[in-house]
Image (cartoon, coloured by chain):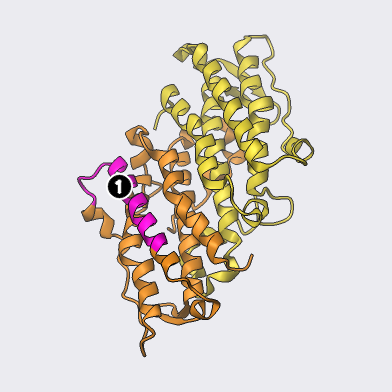
Chain colours: A yellow, B orange
Amino acid sequence: MDFDLDRSIDVLGRTPSTLTALLKGLAEPWITGIEGPDTFSPFDVVGHLIDGEETDWIPRARVILARGPTPQFEPYDRFRHRARNRHRSLASLLDEFASLRVDNLDLVRSWRLTPADLDLPGLHPSLGPVTLRQLLAAWVVHDLGHIAQAVRVMAKQYTGEVGPWVPYLPVLTDHPAPRS
Amino acid sequence: MDFDLDRSIDVLGRTPSTLTALLKGLAEPWITGIEGPDTFSPFDVVGHLIDGEETDWIPRARVILARGPTPQFEPYDRFRHRARNRHRSLASLLDEFASLRVDNLDLVRSWRLTPADLDLPGLHPSLGPVTLRQLLAAWVVHDLGHIAQAVRVMAKQYTGEVGPWVPYLPVLTDHPAPRS
């Protein structure tokens, strides 16, 4: 599928409600379980998505839209949420994420981006030249990847409980070496 | 985490609302995209979950609870949904799935299963001896695996749009050889 701004915004707008339906009010072991050292729990995933709203996607889009001579992005801290959310509840993080996302998507809509705007360049600190279109597509895929991660990590909490079903449930053996 | 009936029912009860938040009303390319030959689209996933409600989990639990001499399960048709749902809308399938799931979880609650009930044996046509506890745990993991699949397949529709971000978005390279 080619990039489509409205279809991208539609998916981005659903992430808070999808995660709320999946996670809000669940018992602790489902939301704090992990799949290996230094991997994200579902709680961490929501915190990481909040970090993205505050420090990643929109700030980087603004760098691009400023049309400066060197549209270089700031590096992004993947573990900012750990200290930030130590004393927070998952419910309050889900509400905060939903509110940030609504505001950020309203902002994107207010830019009335043209195809020429979407071609504007940015400079990623390690990946090099990118376009605004690629940044927005990566935002969509990043959301979906982290929903998949939260769901996979939940599934793995029952790896020892399904008996001989393991080979029929591939989600249990995805990411044997954690990579996100 | 050890198997817990109430916590399992909690997760199972969320799958319809999670998939509805993720999918209902999305543009066609998001819901009909696949990740390779003979793989499920998000539309197929919902149909497959309906097949599970009608022909898999509850019928197999009933075989176990009947306590017969040979508690053998019927084989399960993973592609029943293809013919069944050819002329259906995704919205109507999501509503049907939600209704079937509510009824099936009400039924499970009505059984007031004891730890001894959860130990009762069944005979899987290819996996051999299992217990009711393992069947119910597999139901939970099966749901989560297919939510992860729907989300992953959506993400892959943008593989060509994220430019150099591919290595930072592992969901795009999960299941390079499709296996569910």
Q: Amino acid at mark 1?
A: Leu
The residue located at (65%, 36%) in the rendering is A93
Residue that mark 1 sits on: B93
Res A175 quadrant in image: bottom right
Residue B77 visible somewhere in the drawing:
yes
The chain to which mark 1 is attached is: B
Estimate the x, y position of residue B168 in percent, counting from the top left. Answer: 62, 39
Confirm whether the magenta stretch covers residue B98: yes
Q: Relative to the observer, which residue lies in front, B72 or A2?
A: B72
Question: Residues in magenta?
Answer: B85-106
The residue located at (57%, 44%) in the rendering is A24
Q: In the rendered view, does B147 fall on the left or right side of A67?
A: left
Confirm whether the magenta stretch covers residue A149: no
> Where does the C terminus of chain B fall, quadrant-wise?
bottom left
Examine the residues drawn in magenta and state their main secondary structure: helix
Estimate the x, y position of residue B123 in percent, counting from the top left. Answer: 40, 81
Q: Is residue B58 above or below residue B31?
A: below
Element at label 1 = helix
Residue B37 visible somewhere in the drawing:
no
Estimate the x, y position of residue B107 in percent, counting from the top left. Answer: 38, 65
Q: Is residue B40 above or below residue A53?
A: below
Q: Relative to the observer, which residue lies in front, B180 or A32?
A: A32
The residue located at (45%, 14%) in the rendering is A115
Res B20 quadrant in image: top left
